[in-house]
C-alpha cells in the first residue's frame, strides 16, 4: 500500500519522464484513490461508456456509492493546467474554464451530466479540481464554485486533512461533497408530493352509511376505557386466548418471537392455569411475611390495564370485598396517563392515593381508621407537650383536628400514616399503571424510585405495569434489586377473539332498538332491530379477509385494532342499503376489503399522510435524498427474505450496518431508517431495547405483509403514492396530470381506468428506482437476501389484482364509454 510520501515521490519521477495519461493513472491516481482515499475496486468503474446522439466516449473513472457518484477525468502530467488559480475556491467561470483546464472541466461536466452524476473532478495527477456538475437546485454552472488543491504536495501533505475529508470514501458517504459544494445534503428540494396539491378525496360517492345508527354502541363497545367503567362489560370483553401464529402461509414467513426480558420464569395469565396462580398470589398476600412485588410486562396495547382491572374486579373481587366490621384489603390504581412532565412523581402518587382514601369508606373514616393511624402520635402529644390540655375534651379535639389538617394539607404525612396503618391490618395493593406514558427515561426512573420508596415506607404490596421496552431501559437501576419482583407477562390476545367480544357487547347494547336511514337509491329504510346491523358487520369481519387485514395491521396491539375497526365502520363502506338487503336475504355480507384498507390508511384525513396514519410508507424514507429514498423497502425486504427460512432467528444490527456501508450508505442513514421501521412496527428488536446497531432485529407480521402483499395492492399503492416524493420530472408531471384527470372525471369506470394507469406508472417508477440497489448488491457480493427487487417479485400478482379490480368495476358499472 502506497503512502502519501511515496506517491509524491512517484509523481516527481513520472513528471520528469513526461509520462502518458495511463502512466499518470497507474502510478499516481490509482494509488491516491485506493490507498489514500480508501475507495474499493467495487466502487470504482474505469472507462465507463458515455453515449449520446450516436457518439461514444469513455469516462476515465466513475466513483459510485449508494448515496452519490463522482466522475474523475484524468490528464497526463504534461498537461499544465496553468489556468488554475492559487486559491482554495473559485467560481466555474472566467479564466478557470479556459485553456486546457477549462476543456477538461467541460469534458468532465458533460460526462457527469450524461451519466446523471452530480459531481466531477479533473486532475493531471498534481492539481485536483472538484466541482458540482449536475444540479437540481436551479443554480447555474457558472455560479457554482470548485474546490481546488493546486498541487499534489497540497493534497497529500500541507492540506491533506481537507483533501481526505472531501474525497475519501468515508467522507463522500457522510455527504461532505454535498455539504462543501452545494451547502446541503438534500437533493429533494422541490415540493413533489401529491398530497401537497390534492388535499381532498377524489371519491365523489355519496355515503349513505348505517354507522350513525350504531355509533353510540360501537363507541362504547370498542372503547379502551370500557375496562375501567363497567365490571359487567369488562367480564364480557376479557379474552383469555393468546395469539398463536408462528407461520403465516399466505406470505410464507415464520413469525419470530422476541426474548423474555426477565431473568426468571414469568407467569403468563392468558394460559388458564397460570391465571389461577396469579389470583392465588393476590389472595396469599395477607399470609406473607413481607409484601409482594409484581411486575406486569407486555407490549404496547397487549392489554396490561385490562388484565389488572380483570384481576381486581373479577378474578380476585372477593379478596377486596368491603367489610363494615373489620379492616379489609385495598387495591389502589395510580394511572400515570394524566401525569405531566415537570411534576414530581411522588407528589402525583400521593395526590392520587389521597383521593382514593377520601373515596374509601374505611380509610376515610375517623372512627375506624384515622384515629387509630394517628393514635401513637396523639398519645405522645398529650403525654408530653399538650399534657395540660389532656383532660379538656374540647381543646383536645381542636388540637387533634389541627394536627390532622396540617398533615392533610401537606398530603404526604397524612397519606403515609393512613396507608401504613391499613397495610398493617390487611393487604394494600398499589398499582402503578401506564408508566410508559412518561416519555422521558429519567422521569420513568423517578417514578420507579418514588413508588418503591413509598412501598418500603408503608409496607404495601406494589404492582408496576409497563412495556418490556420500558423495563429493559430501566432494569439496570439498582432499585429493582431492592424488590423481589414476581414477573407477569401479558401475551397479546387473539385480535379476532377481542373483536368478537366487542361486537357481542355492541349487539347487546342495541338489542330491541329500531332505526331508519336513507339508502343509496334515496329510499327510506326502516331497521326493525339495530342488532341486525351488528350481525351484518360481524359476519363481514370475523374469519374473513377483512378480519385478517385488521389483525395484520394491528400487530397484536388491541388499541390499534379497536381504533381501526371503528374507523372503517365509520367511513369504509358505501352501499349500506345494498349491504343490509344482501345480509337479510342471504345471512351474510362481505364488505369490500379495499374500502376498509383505504379507511384505515386515511384515518380522519381526506388523503394519505404518513404522520397521521397507522400505516407507514415503505416507498419514502423521508431523508430528502433520492438515492436513499427506498432504504426502508430495501432493509425490510432483506429481513423478510431471511425470515422465510425456518432456522432464521434474527438479523444483527451490525450486519445491516456492514451491508449498507458496503453499498456506500453512512451509519446515520442506516440507523434513521432502522429506527423508523421499528417505530412503524415493521421491525422489532429481539431484546425490546431501542433500535441500534448493537441490537438484533426480527420482522413483524405487518412488515412481512408490506413486502409480500401490500406493495402489490392497488389501494395501498394509491394511498402511499400521495405521500411519496417523485424525483423524476417526467414521472412527476405524468402522475400529477393523471391525478388531476382523476379528480375531474365523473364517470366511475373512466375514473377507474385512469386510476389503473396512474398506479401502474407509480409501480413502474418505484421498481426502476429500486433497481440500482439490487444491481449494486449483486455486484458487491452481498448475501442473496439483499439481492432481489421485491417489486419485481410481486409484479405478476400486482397485474392480476389490477385486472381483477378493473373487471369488478366493469361488472358493477358497465363497459368504458368513449
Image: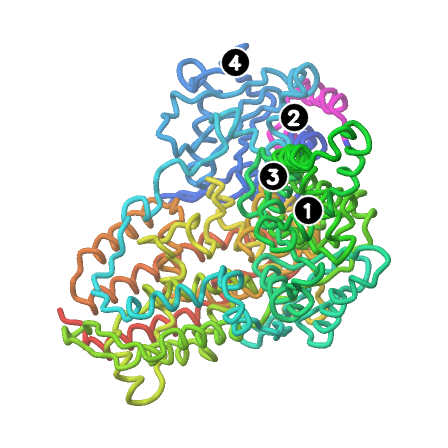
Q: Is residue 617 left or right of residue 594?
A: right
Q: Is residue 290 above or below residue 380?
A: below
Residues under numbered marks 3 and 2 in contact, where contact means CB atoms less than 8 Å apart: no
Q: Earlier in the sequence, mark 3 or mark 2?
A: 2
Residue behind mark 1: 370
State how far apart marks 3 and 2 are (Cα): 20 Å
In the image, 327 versus 131, the foreground residue is 327
The crowd level at tag 4 (other Cα within 10 Å; few <14, some 14-19, many 20+) is: few
Residues 71 and 206: in front is: 206
Q: Position of residue 759 (x, y in %)?
A: 34, 61
Badge 3 or badge 1: first in the primary sequence: 1
**In the foreground, 717 or 94:** 717
Q: Residue furthest bottom?
A: 586
Distance from the alpha carbon under mark 4 to that under mark 3: 41 Å
Counting from the top left corner in percent of width and height, residue 93 is at: 40, 17
In front: 590, or 130?
Answer: 590
Residue hosting label 2: 164
Residue bearing mark 3: 668
Question: Element under label 4?
Answer: loop
Amino acid at each position: 500500500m502506497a503512502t502519501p510520501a511515496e506517491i509524491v515521490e512517484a509523481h516527481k519521477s513520472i513528471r520528469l519522464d513526461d509520462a502518458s495519461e495511463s502512466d499518470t493513472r497507474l502510478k499516481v491516481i490509482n494509488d491516491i484513490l485506493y490507498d489514500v482515499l480508501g475507495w474499493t475496486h467495487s466502487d470504482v468503474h474505469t472507462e465507463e461508456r458515455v453515449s449520446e446522439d450516436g457518439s461514444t466516449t469513455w469516462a476515465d473513472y466513475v466513483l459510485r456509492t449508494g448515496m452519490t457518484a463522482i466522475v474523475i477525468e484524468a490528464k497526463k502530467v504534461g498537461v499544465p493546467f496553468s489556468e488554475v488559480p492559487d486559491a482554495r475556491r473559485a467560481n466555474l467561470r472566467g479564466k478557470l474554464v479556459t485553456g486546457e483546464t477549462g476543456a477538461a472541466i467541460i469534458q468532465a461536466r458533460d460526462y457527469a451530466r450524461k451519466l446523471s452524476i452530480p459531481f466531477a473532478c479533473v486532475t493531471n495527477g498534481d492539481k485536483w479540481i472538484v466541482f458540482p456538475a449536475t444540479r437540481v437546485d436551479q443554480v447555474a454552472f457558472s455560479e457554482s464554485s470548485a474546490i481546488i488543491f493546486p498541487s499534489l504536495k497540497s493534497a497529500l501533505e500541507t492540506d491533506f486533512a481537507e483533501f481526505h475529508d472531501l474525497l475519501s470514501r468515508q467522507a463522500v458517504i457522510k455527504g461532505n461533497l454535498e455539504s462543501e459544494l452545494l451547502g446541503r445534503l438534500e437533493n429533494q428540494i422541490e415540493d413533489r408530493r401529491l398530497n401537497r396539491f390534492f388535499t381532498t378525496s377524489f371519491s365523489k360517492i355519496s355515503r349513505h352509511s348505517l354507522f350513525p345508527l350504531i355509533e353510540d354502541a360501537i363507541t362504547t363497545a370498542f372503547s379502551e376505557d370500557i375496562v375501567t367503567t363497567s365490571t359487567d362489560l369488562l367480564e364480557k370483553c376479557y379474552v383469555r386466548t393468546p395469539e398463536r401464529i408462528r407461520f403465516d402461509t399466505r406470505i410464507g414467513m415464520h413469525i419470530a418471537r422476541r426474548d423474555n426480558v426477565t431473568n426468571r420464569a414469568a407467569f403468563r395469565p392468558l394460559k388458564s392455569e397460570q391465571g389461577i396462580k396469579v389470583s392465588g398470589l393476590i389472595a396469599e398476600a395477607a399470609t406473607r411475611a413481607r409484601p409482594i412485588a409484581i411486575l406486569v410486562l407486555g407490549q404496547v396495547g397487549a392489554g396490561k390495564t385490562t388484565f389488572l382491572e380483570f384481576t381486581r374486579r373479577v378474578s380476585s373481587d372477593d379478596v377486596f370485598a368491603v367489610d363494615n366490621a373489620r379492616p379489609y384489603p385495598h387495591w389502589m390504581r395510580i394511572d400515570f396517563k394524566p401525569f405531566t412532565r415537570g411534576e414530581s412523581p411522588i407528589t402525583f402518587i400521593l395526590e392520587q392515593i389521597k383521593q382514593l382514601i377520601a373515596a374509601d369508606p374505611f380509610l376515610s373514616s375517623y372512627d375506624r381508621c384515622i384515629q387509630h393511624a394517628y393514635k401513637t402520635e396523639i398519645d405522645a402529644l398529650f403525654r408530653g407537650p399538650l399534657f395540660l390540655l389532656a383532660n379538656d375534651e374540647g381543646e383536645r379535639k381542636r388540637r387533634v383536628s389541627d394536627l390532622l389538617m396540617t398533615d392533610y394539607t401537606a398530603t404526604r404525612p397524612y397519606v403515609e400514616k393512613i396507608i401504613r396503618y391499613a397495610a398493617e391490618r390487611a393487604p394494600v395493593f398499589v398499582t402503578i399503571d401506564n408508566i410508559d406514558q412518561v416519555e422521558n427515561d429519567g422521569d420513568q426512573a423517578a417514578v420507579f424510585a418514588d413508588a418503591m420508596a413509598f412501598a418500603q415506607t408503608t409496607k404495601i404490596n406494589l404492582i408496576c405495569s409497563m412495556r418490556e421496552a420500558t423495563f429493559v431501559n430501566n432494569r439496570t437501576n439498582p432499585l429493582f434489586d431492592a424488590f423481589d419482583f414476581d414477573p407477569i407477562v401479558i401475551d397479546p390476545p387473539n385480535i379476532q377473539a377481542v373483536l368478537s367480544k366487542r361486537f357481542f357487547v355492541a349487539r347487546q347494547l342495541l338489542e330491541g332498538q329500531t332505526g331508519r336511514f336513507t339508502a343509496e337509491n334515496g329510499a327510506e329504510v326502516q331497521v326493525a332491530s339495530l342488532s341486525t346491523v351488528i350481525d351484518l358487520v360481524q359476519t363481514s369481519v370475523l374469519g374473513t379477509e377483512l378480519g385478517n387485514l385488521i389483525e395484520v395491521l394491528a400487530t397484536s396491539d388491541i388499541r390499534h385494532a379497536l381504533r381501526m375497526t371503528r374507523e372503517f365502520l365509520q367511513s369504509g363502506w358505501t352501499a349500506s342499503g345494498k349491504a343490509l338487503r344482501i345480509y337479510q336475504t342471504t345471512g351474510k355480507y362481505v364488505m369490500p376489503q379495499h374500502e376498509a384498507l383505504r379507511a384505515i390508511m386515511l384515518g380522519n384525513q381526506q388523503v394519505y399522510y404518513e404522520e397521521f396514519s397507522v400505516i407507514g410508507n415503505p416507498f419514502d424514507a423521508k431523508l430528502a435524498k433520492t438515492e436513499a429514498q427506498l432504504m426502508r423497502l430495501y432493509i425490510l425486504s432483506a429481513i423478510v427474505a431471511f425470515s422465510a427460512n425456518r432456522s432464521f432467528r434474527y438479523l444483527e444490527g451490525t450486519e445491516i450496518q456492514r451491508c449498507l456501508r458496503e453499498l456506500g450508505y453512512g451509519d446515520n442513514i442506516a440507523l434513521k431508517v432502522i429506527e423508523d421501521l421499528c417505530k412503524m412496527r415493521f421491525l422489532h428488536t429481539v431484546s425490546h431495547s431501542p433500535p441500534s446497531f448493537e441490537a438484533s432485529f426480527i420482522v413483524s407480521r405487518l412488515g412481512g405483509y408490506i413486502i409480500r402483499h401490500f406493495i402489490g395492492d392497488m389501494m395501498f399503492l394509491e394511498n402511499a403514492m400521495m405521500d411519496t416524493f417523485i424525483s423524476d420530472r417526467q414521472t412527476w408531471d405524468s402522475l400529477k396530470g393523471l391525478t388531476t384527470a382523476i379528480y375531474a372525471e365523473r364517470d366511475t369506470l373512466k375514473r377507474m381506468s385512469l386510476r389503473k394507469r396512474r398506479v401502474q406508472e407509480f409501480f413502474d417508477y418505484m421498481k426502476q428506482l429500486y433497481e440500482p440497489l439490487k444491481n449494486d448488491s449483486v455486484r458487491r457480493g452481498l448475501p442473496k437476501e439483499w439481492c432481489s427487487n421485491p417489486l419485481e417479485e410481486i409484479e405478476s400478482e400486482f397485474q392480476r389484482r389490477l385486472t381483477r379490480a378493473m373487471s369488478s368495476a366493469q361488472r358493477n358499472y358497465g363497459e368504458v364509454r368513449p
